Image (cartoon, grey):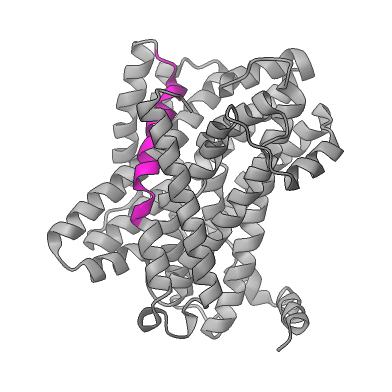
Amino acid sequence: MTLFQKVIDYFKIFSDRKLLAFMGSGLIVSVAYMDPGNWGTDIAGGASFNYDLLWVVWLASGMAMLFQYLSGKLGIAGYSLPELVREKLKKKWLVLSYWILAEIAILATDLAEFLGIVVALNLLFGIPLLFGTYIAVADVLIIILLTQKRFRTLEQAFIIFVSIIGLGYVYELFITKPDVPSILLHSVKPILTSQSALIAVGIIGATVMPHALFVHSWLIKNKIIGNHFGSKSKILKYHLIDNVVSLTIAGFINAAIIIMSAAAFYQVANVATLDQAYTTLIPLFGKFAAIVFALALLSAGISSSVTGTLAGQSVMDGLTGFRISLWIRRLITRFINVIPVTIAVLLGIEPLKILVLSQVALSLLIPLPLIPLIIYTSNKSIMKELVNKKITTIFAIIFGIVILGFNGYLLYQVIFQGVGI
């Protein structure tokens, strides 16, 4: 089959009703790439370096697409990444150690989402950060409501969450009137200086999240159980389309954050945090623009928080076989997150600075899912007919080295040079 015929074949799939029934898992995973933790880095990048780092967003999105595609392939092959790790490690102490580290990664991720919700509540309703930390615990109720009937309801809810974020930034771009020629230029022209390197590292280093790699395989595996989507090759095509569409949306939203920040804040205001972005938007573009920004942040925090909970469930199910209900797990996670945020507020520490520690933890722990994912999807005895092509494995290894290299540099700067993200 020629390349042209393959393209035509994929376009025919868009008329297949089963594709619409299959899509949704990619959307749930995609919010990991537009969570509040990424917002701060993107805003700082646009405010400080104009459109210069736009190319980094597109590069990071491309790498994320590949690894999420590989994770989903594991699910189609009948495995979740955590359970496959348990099967291959075998020794209990190794599995237990891996599980503890994976749980730390989930908690570090969820902390960023938690902070996003707390800050959004403060911006929208003036709720003090201390009280907001306890109100944000109630997002467990959202999970209960969305998952008590069927999982498809949760996928449909994510369409609303992502739509709010996306439409919010369409509006922000409309009123800030960015420079379109500069956007096109810096999307393809790499510019990196010693000053912008750390932000670039932050964007790439925090892009491929451990929890997103864990959960995608688990979501796909559970989705195809009991459903008749067709052969594995047909499901793989559905997955590829779902993955590309969902992560393209996430990539555009991340790009929109940098573009909006460049258009609104570059050489106008010193903006480094989410609350500064909100308050700076008011005199420049009006109260409504700031409210739209905060609503999008709240949607990002809640939706990515749900994804984090599902990731925690996949890790626990796969590595320990021990299952607890999502709402109990959510309450436990939330109360654990309340502690560092409460301490920070009481000591007068800027809560978003905690994101530095959470991103450092994620940088340390990204090899946990990344390395096994590349190894397992390249193993024919595991993947059978779904095994990676050599070119896919080569790109996965190159991208993996790039991500691990960027994360290593980020850790060096933060830990040894005392530089904040």
Q: Report the span colored magenta.
A: 349-368
Tell me what residue is drawn at x 40 percent, y 22 percent.
418
Q: Judge from the rendering whether residue 14 lies leftward or rightward of residue 117; answer left or right.
A: right
Quadrant of image for the N terminus = bottom right
Tell me what residue is drawn at x 52 percent, y 46 percent.
207
Membership of 362 in magenta stretch: yes
Q: Position of residue 405 (x, y in %)?
A: 45, 47
Q: Position of residue 87 (x, y in %)?
A: 24, 71
Residue 357, image quadrant: top left
Q: Is residue 262 above or below residue 32?
A: above
Q: Position of residue 148 (x, y in %)?
A: 43, 55
Q: Position of residue 411 (x, y in %)?
A: 39, 36
Q: Is residue 332 above or below residue 16?
A: above
Residue 140 visible to the viewer:
no
Tell me what residue is drawn at x 84 percent, y 33 percent.
179
Membership of 248 in magenta stretch: no
